[in-house]
Image: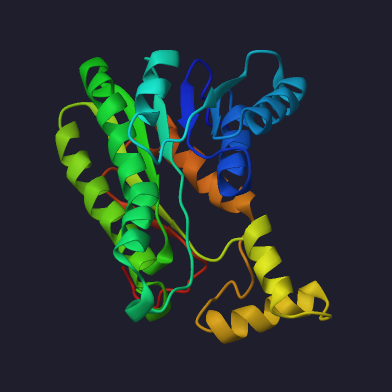
Amino acid sequence: MNLDLAGKIALVSASTAGIGSAIAMQLLEDGARVIINGRSEAGVAQRVSELNKRFGEGRALPLVADVSQAGGEAIAAAAYPHIDILINNLGTYELSDFFSTSDEDWQRMFETNVWSGVRLARTYLKGMLERGHGRVIFISSEVALTPMAAMAHYSASKATQLSISRSLAELTKGTSVTVNAVLPGPTETESLKGFIESVNPGLPYAEAEKKFMAENRPSSLLYRLAKPAEVANVVAFLSSERAAVINGAAIRAEGGTVQTMV
C-alpha cells in the first residue's frame, strides 16, 4: 500500500532507537521528511547521518531536545515551526512496588509520558487546525486498558494519554486533522530484550522470549514480542490519508493480549 507521505514533515519524539526509530524509518520509507529527536547531540547526529545516507540528504532532520522537560517544546518550535505529523513516542517504564513508589517517581513518569505529549501537542496542534490538516498520534500501551499493580504509575500515565488523545480529537471537528492513540503490547526493543536476557541468564534468547510471554502475557494471541516495525506500520497508516476516517480512536497493536472485543 502506497501511503504517499511525500511533502509531509513529521516529528517523532525519542526517535534514535526502539519503536520511535522504527516509526521514523517507516515514515521516511513512505516519503515524509522526519525530524529525529533525542537528548544526545551525538546520538541524534549519528542517526540522522545513517538515515540520510539511506534515504537522501535532508530527508532526516535533527532535533536535540529533552521534550520531557518544560522548554523542550520551545526548542522544537524554534527549529521547526511547521510540521504535519506529530508522533508523541517518548516514554519510560519501570517495575515499582506501589508502596515504595515516591511522589518523585510518579512525577517523573508523568513528565515523560504525559507532559511531553501535552506540550508538543499544545505547540503544534493549533497550527494544524488553522491549516485544516494534520496528524497527532500518541504512543500509549496495552496497560492503559489492563493496568498492572507492579507498574501503577506507568499504567496510569498510559491511560491518561488515551484521555488526552480523545479530548484533543474533539477539537478537530470540520477539519482534516486527526488525533489518535496506538497501544502496542510487549515489543522487541533493545531495552526489553536486555531485560529478558538479564532475568534468564544462560537461556537461549528464543526460549527466554517464550518464557517471558508465558509468564507475563499468557493471553497474547501473537505469543511473541511484536517487532518495532510492525508497530510502525500501524502508526504510518494512521499518519496517512488512507486513515482519514479514524479519529479519536485507541488503536490496539498488542497482538490480542487484551481480552475484550473493543
Say if 61 sits above or below 256 in the image.
above
Q: Quadrant of the N terminus?
A: top right
In this rendering, would 153 be left or right of 225? left
Q: With 220 as the anchor, is 202 left or right in this view? A: right
Residue for point 60% across, 36% down? 26
Toward the viewer: 79 or 50? 79
Give the x, y percent position of residue 178: 29, 36
Question: Residue 172, how many percent across, how many down?
Answer: 19, 32
- Write the residue at 69% across / 79% down: 199
Q: Quadrant of residue 225?
A: bottom right
Residue 251, above or below 37: below
Task: Give percent across and percent down for residue 138.
Answer: 37, 45
Screen quadrant of the C terminus: bottom left
The answer to whether any part of residue 109 appears in the image is: yes
Q: Is residue 34 visible?
A: no
153 shown above or below 31: below
Pick the residue in front: 224 or 35: 35
Counting every numbered tag in the picture gives: 0
Q: Nearer the viewer, residue 233 or 52?
A: 52
Residue 136 position in % (x across, y down): 35, 36
**Residue 149 vertical position relative to residue 58 in the rendered view, above or below:** below
Residue at (61, 52) in percent of width and height: 228
Here the colouring is rainbow
Q: Residue at x 66, y 69 (%)?
A: 195
